[in-house]
Amino acid sequence: MNENQILEMGTATLGRVEIAPEVIEVIAGIAAAEVDGVSSMRGNLASGISEIIGKKYHGKGVRVDLSDDRITIDVYILVKFGKSIPTVAGNVQDNIRQALLTMTGLELSEVNVHVVGVQFDTKPEQEAPIEL
């Protein structure tokens, strides 16, 4: 994604409305994380460091491409074990499309879901009884 790209929405009553690609990333990231079956989003080094110091980055695991008057979103997720991957991926696509349409009025060209892992439930180990 080119950092200088701004999506121009047109002219409003008092001036222009522009949306930065980072805003689309955040909306898509939150919408994807809300879907039942999504364990987490895959981040990069920068988002990992941000979360270590206490900043939550909601655009983690989302890449937005604005080119040729098309909006393409790539989402990288981990799916919970036991959930249907095609169902979860379809729900992620639908939720992102609906969230962006509701919040920005934008129609997407593509929402590509990349399942990069499966998250297994980790149950805390049961403590052994103390013998006296």
Image (tube, rainbow, N blue to C red):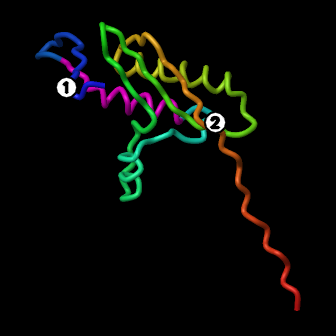
Asked if disc 2 and disc 1 are in contact, CB closer than 8 Å, the reply is no
Image height check: is 113 above or below 70? below
Residue 27: say if magenta. yes
Q: Write down the region rendered in magenta.
A: 17-33
Q: Quadrant of the N terminus?
A: top left
Q: Is disc 1 placed on a helix, strand or loop?
A: loop
Residue 107: say if magenta. no
Q: Amino acid at mark 2?
A: Val
Q: Which is nearer the N-term, disc 2 or disc 1? A: 1
Out of 67 and 21, give the one closest to the viewer.
67
Image height check: is 109 above or below 46? above
- Residue 65 % position (x, y): 35, 20
Residue drawn at x 65%, y 44% as measured from the top left: 119
Residue drawn at x 52%, y 36% as measured from the top left: 33
Determine the image quadrant of residue 131: bottom right
Instruction: Residue 88: give its label.
Output: none
Residue drawn at x 76%, y 65% as measured from the top left: 125
Farthest-out residue, left: 14
- Residue 118 % position (x, y): 66, 39
Q: Amino acid at mark 1?
A: Asn
The residue at which mark 1 appears reads as: 4
Out of 100 and 113, give the one closest to the viewer.
113
Residue drawn at x 31%, y 17% as measured from the top left: 66
The residue at which mark 2 appears reads as: 79
Tell me the crowding category of disc 1: few under 14, some 14 to 19, or many 20 or more residues within 10 angstroms, Cα based: few
